[in-house]
Amino acid sequence: MIDVIIVGGGPTGMMLAAELRLQGVDVLVLERDPEPTQAVRALGLHPRTIEIMDQRGLLDRFLAEGRQYPGIGRFAGIDKPLPVEPGSGHSYILGIPQPITDRLLAEHATELGAVIQRGCEVTGVVQDDDGVQIELSDGRTLRSRWLVGCDGGRSLVRRLLGVTFPGDAATTEWIHSELEVTASAEDVASAVEEIRKEHRGFGIGPAGNGAYRAVVPAAAVSEDRTIPPTLDELRSRLREYAGTDFGVHSPRWITRFSDATRLADRYRAGRVFLAGDAAHVHPPLGGQGLNLGVQDAFNLGWKLAAAVNGWAPDGLLDSYEAERHPVAADVLTLTRAQSELISPEPGPQAVRRLLAELLDFDDVGRFLAGRISSLGIRYDVGPGPDLLGRRAPDQQLSGGRLFELLRSGRGLLLDGPGSEGTAQFDGAAQFDGAGSDGRQSGSAGLSVAGWERRVDRVPASLAQTGTASALLRPDGHVVWLGDTQDELNGALRRWFGEPERRERRVT
């Protein structure tokens, strides 16, 4: 039996496969399309996703293929760049077409040992108490302990599970294409500048390698979005807005997207999970879709691996939905708002002008920047200081750079300056918690004895915590701050399960 089958080989599925393989989990990725798509559905990575790539040692690969754009971007196209969130070492958007992101993540997953099968269409899903059985269009059946649907906005896995997908149906649709033009670059740029004064949903510009990327509103919402638009349809819409079709020809791809906004009512049904567009769809304004899916995978991966490996504490798997569902709801709110604000109608334009004035206040800009970049996410891990539940910013520690220390995919205890001793398991007795003074017997600092195979320890502290120690999950979020062993043991049990018990050492 396979440990985990992932349905869908896009960025969410590949990121999840890599996270599971990092923990030694047997993974099979099934992708319906026989070849990776070359359609560019996303154009960049936001700061939190860039941090994730850094935490897994992938950032150099992405930087080599992309282009850095300082800042967080703009909200609804308002010509005021959002300020950088304090505490991030990656204060830029990384421009990189999705096909390259797909390739890099697939290579990473493969290097870690994930098996990827393309041209495999899932037609049925049935689960029981012990596992999940899937049927493929070629007549094969496969069985796994767990299954994750990363199969996009029209997810078959979601439909077969009976998970509802409430939200708003599409009211507007855009045609998106990469092609060549005969018009001069100057004529194209001049026309776009004039049109975008009233129609922010229109654009055409260089995409590299002699091609142009065009986005133009469609005449109506299509009844069947699986049927791609035609070149003639695109030409007609360009003439409608610009008075010319710019001589577009030789399309590399043509696709469509809409402002449909939906959020699955639940992310888990028994042994099956949903992630990425299978769990949420929204307009692409702000470029958050790919980033949201990759971050879903980063949250789910280590938790699902803990269940496969037998040490997941009660509630850990359910924390995936508890943490990620509200994040997706926030993204849907942001994209809905931006979709309204690009409308040329007088009401939305009045709100747009007001927001442009509000963005002169730093707090407003920082609030939006934190939401769009995902650097402002704070998971509810319990009461405590503001840092609790947030991702730990990167910093240089005595044992190395923080993000480099997280590359193993294990938890990390940063044992503050008051606990500089070497915390080792006391082999003279079976592990049973802490000594009478609240410290681990036989050690000068806090200890992860019993959890050594799940949590690393470094004698250092986060800059924001003074001398307090901090416990980080494998995704880099802070889940405990303190200085006593008893409290630490409680946090370790909550997030990393019961300690491994050891036999008494014979001397």
Image (tube, rainbow, N blue to C red):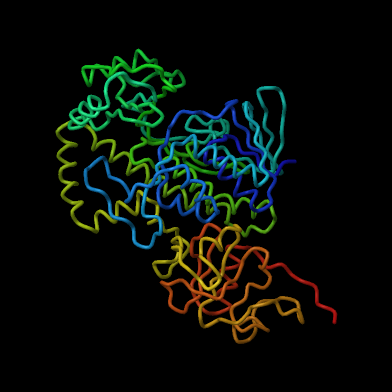
On the image, the x and y values in percent for residue 380 come to 45, 60
Q: Give the answer, above or below, for where 282 lies relative to 363.
A: above
Q: Which residue is located at x 57 percent, y 37 percent?
A: 149
Q: How many marks?
A: 0
Quadrant for the N terminus in the image: top right
Left or right position of 325 against 242: right
Residue at far top of view: 232
Q: Is residue 262 left or right of residue 271?
A: left
Q: Nearer the viewer, residue 235 or 332?
A: 235
Residue 232 sits above or below residue 300 on the image: above
Q: Locate the C terminus by quadrant.
A: bottom right
The residue shown at (50%, 47%) is: 296
Residue 248 position within the rendered picture, expressed as x and y whole percent measured from the top left: 33, 18
Name the foreground residue: 374 vs 39: 39
Q: Is residue 262 above or below residue 450?
A: above
Q: Is residue 348 left or right of residue 291?
A: left
